[in-house]
Structures are given as C-alpha cells and as structure tokens.
Image (tube, rainbow, N blue to C red):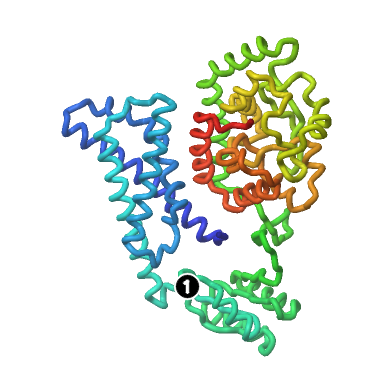
Amino acid sequence: MAISRKDSFTIQVLQLSDALLVWAAFLIGGTLRNSLVGAAEEEALAAMNWVLYIAVPFTPLILERFGFYEHLRHKSTSSAVWQLLRGLVGIILFIGVFAIFAKQVDARRLSLGIGLLFVFILLLARDRATKRWLKRRTESDATKERVIIAGSDGEMDELLAELDPEITSGWKIVDHFDLGKREVTELFSLLKDQSVSRVLFSAKNTEFQKVAQAVEACELQGVEAWISASFIRSQIARPVFDAVGNKPMLVLRSTPELSWELLCKEVFDRVGAALIILFSSPLWIFAAVGIALKSPGAPVFFSQMRAGRYGQPFRMWKFRTMVANAEELLDKIKEQHGNQMEGPVFKLDNDPRVFRFGSMLRKYSIDEFPQLLNVLWGDMSLVGPRPLPIYEVEAFYEFSHRRRLSVKPGITCEWQAGGRNHITSFEEWVAMDLRYIDNWSLWLDFQILLKTIPAVLFGKGAK
C-alpha cells in the first residue's frame, strides 16, 4: 500500500522510538534479573548483547509487517495488543532460530522473559499515548491542517470519497474551489485569509492551463500544491513523484521502492551468505571430494551465464551434478524425453545427464551452495526469483514475463521453497514470482527462508 512521505517519516520516527524502547525494556529486564538473583550486572547484560542486536532493529520491522503502524488515530486497544503479541512471537522465533544456528546459548532466560514483558508494556503504552495525542489534535479545529480541495464539482467529491477517513480526519477543509467556475485571483485571497497549508488538485477533467495558474498561486504564497495523478490509469505500477536534477517527474514504479527495509535486505544478504558459507564449509568439502571421485576428469564447479536484474548477464556458480558435456546433450535430451515444464524453461525429472552422486547433491540442494558467492558479489540475493539461463530468457513469449527480472534473482523463492516439483506451468511459476515482487517485504523473505529449511532438510530439492 502506497503511503505519503509524511506518513512514511512518521512511521520511521515511531520505529526509531520503539527500537529505543525495546533496548530500554531489555535493560530493565537485565537489571531486575540481577536484583532478583544477585548476579553481576555487567556479566548479565553482556550475555544479552546478541539478543539486543536482533531484537532492537528487527522488532519494529516485524511489527510493521503486522500493521502496528497503521490507523494510528482509530486503532483499538485489542487490535494493538493482538498485533504486539503476533510481533513478539515473530521476534521470539527469530531469536530462537538464530540461537540454534549460531549456537548462541549464553543468554539469561529470566532476563529475556522480563525484557519481552517490558517490550510489550512499553510499546503498548507508546501506541496508546500516540493515539490519544493524535486524537486530541484532530478534535480541535485549531490544530487541524487547513486544506483546500480544487477541481470540478464531481472530481472533488470523487477525490474525497476515495481518501481514507484516517487521513481526512486531520484536515479542516476550508473550501471546495471549482477551477472551472471561479477565477484564480479568488484562490490568492483564500490562501491568505484562511491560512491554508496545502491545496489538493483533482485535475482529471480540468483544463491544464487553469491548474498551472492555480499551482503558481500556491507557489507564490509558499503553499504546498498536491496534484492527484488519477488521470493516469496503471494496473500494477504505483505512481510517485520524484525529480531528475531540477525536473519534477511522475514515476510509475512496479518494484519495491528504495527504503531502509530494502537496505536491510542487502546487508542481511551479504552477512547471511558469509555465515552460511562458514557453517556449511564441511558440506562444500564433501561435495567437492564426491564429485572428483564419482565424476573425474571434469571441473567440480559448474558455471553458466544467467540473467540478473533487468536481464544483465552474470556468471552463476553451482556444484556440478551433470556429466561434463551436459550442455551439448540438451537438445538431444529434449528430443528424446520431452520437457515437463510448459513454456521456455526446461525441466525433467530423472534427467539422464545427472550422475548418481550429483542426484544426491540436488536432492538436498547442496549443489546450490556456490551461489552464496554470487550473493556476496552482489549478483544475487538470498531470496528472489530464480535466475534463468540467457537463452531461456530470450525465448520468453510474453513481455510481462520480463517483470520477474526487475529485482535481483535469488537462491530461493516461493517456487523453490514449496512445491517446485509439482509445478509444470511456466505461467504459474511466473505468477508466483510476480506475487512475491508485488508483496515484497523483509518479513516475506524471512518466511520463505524458514520454509526453505525443511525443504532442504527433508530432501525436497530438484530431481
């Protein structure tokens, strides 16, 4: 859901304050635990440091996923409590998974329990205080933002009907200014006499010359002019305004917008890839030795040019699971065995080019581990649409299929984590990728990674 820059800034401020409250809650938890058991304060707090590194930055992000920062003025206490409980369960699972894989068991359970209790109390108190403060501001006309709606009669009513009452409750609409019937000079007087802070234009059926004159009137008095972009009908892309140099631009974006959450994904990818390489290094040795013994005379690694973001070619690495001349045999295999995947992508269960040890590597997805190097180099992400060979991308028969190239490719995705051996339609595969792109969030990435773990452990890899 698209939100305004002001609302986005408000959410970021609340998330920063909540992160500080989470830190304070665990500090209180450690202090109370020390007073109860008589332990050294420095030792107990030091044991909780790794928990703070997870809970402080990620608790606000998880809460955002559960809608904790939406409808701030009208959210009920029961909704806030439910969102907080779901968010805390999420962060507990996150801490538990990290503790298992990173072997971080040096934490004080009493400190953790008290800290989580105070996280709940402090964040709920902050949320209720925010609601009361916002509600108090909207109850008085003196504190409401003074706004003018400009356009034609039908357009103005339509615009107001489409806006969320959560937003309009903070406005005092001082006038509906009909640009078709009234002179712009009247707008000058209104802006001055009514102390207006912004004018919203719904200009779908209004002459652009009149809109330009009205915008100039706002500009001369330092009043913000907001122009509805509903005259452009886009099915997928979200319209936002930006600038190239000093030129204002209306941007139609159908991919995740640059944000702190996207930056966290980049950091998480690089750090996560490095940690997984470190902890999985015995499997790398096992795979390399096994390939060298079971399929001698050919490289241990297999590399192929794949399509990255926007189709930019990059070299992707895997452990070799096929015979050395597998690429040359592809056309012959297609002719003899067909293709189980409808569309430009090739997929075949029990591919005869796969040698026996390679089949085992595929079953447990060990062959995919070298792609972690691609993640470290920035060509790939841990989660994203699977990268396809260049020749398969060039065979796309629908332009819409290329939208899956608008984000970095990943090692795992919804298709990879659940049911990839049951999907035989390329259209269905693309639909899953586009659904991921349209609904992307850091929390969705975590969910897919959690689904990938059992898929790997129980051998639900490629055949």
Vertical relation: 38 (above or below) 139: above
Tell me the element at label 1: helix
> Of residues 145 and 391, which is closer to you in this image?
391
For the N terminus, give its image quadrant.
bottom right
What is the quadrant of residue 373 in the picture? top right
Can I make out residue 406 in this image? no
The structure residue drawn at horizontal position 34% and vertical position 26%, both measured from the top left corner, is 105
> Of residues 419 and 340, which is closer to you in this image?
340
Left or right: 183, with 146 as reference point: right
Query: Residue 71, image x and y in percent?
Result: 43, 64
Left or right: 99, with 198 as reference point: left
Q: Amino acid at mark 1?
A: Pro
Q: Which residue is mark 1?
A: 165
Query: Residue 409, image x and y in percent?
Result: 66, 39
The structure residue drawn at horizontal position 56% and vertical position 29%, both measured from the top left corner, is 273
Query: Residue 284, image x and y in percent?
Result: 59, 18
The structure residue drawn at horizontal position 56% and vertical position 39%, both measured from the top left corner, is 417
> Of residues 417 and 73, which is closer to you in this image?
417
Query: Residue 120, image x and y in percent?
Result: 31, 49
What is the quadrant of residue 391 in the picture? top right
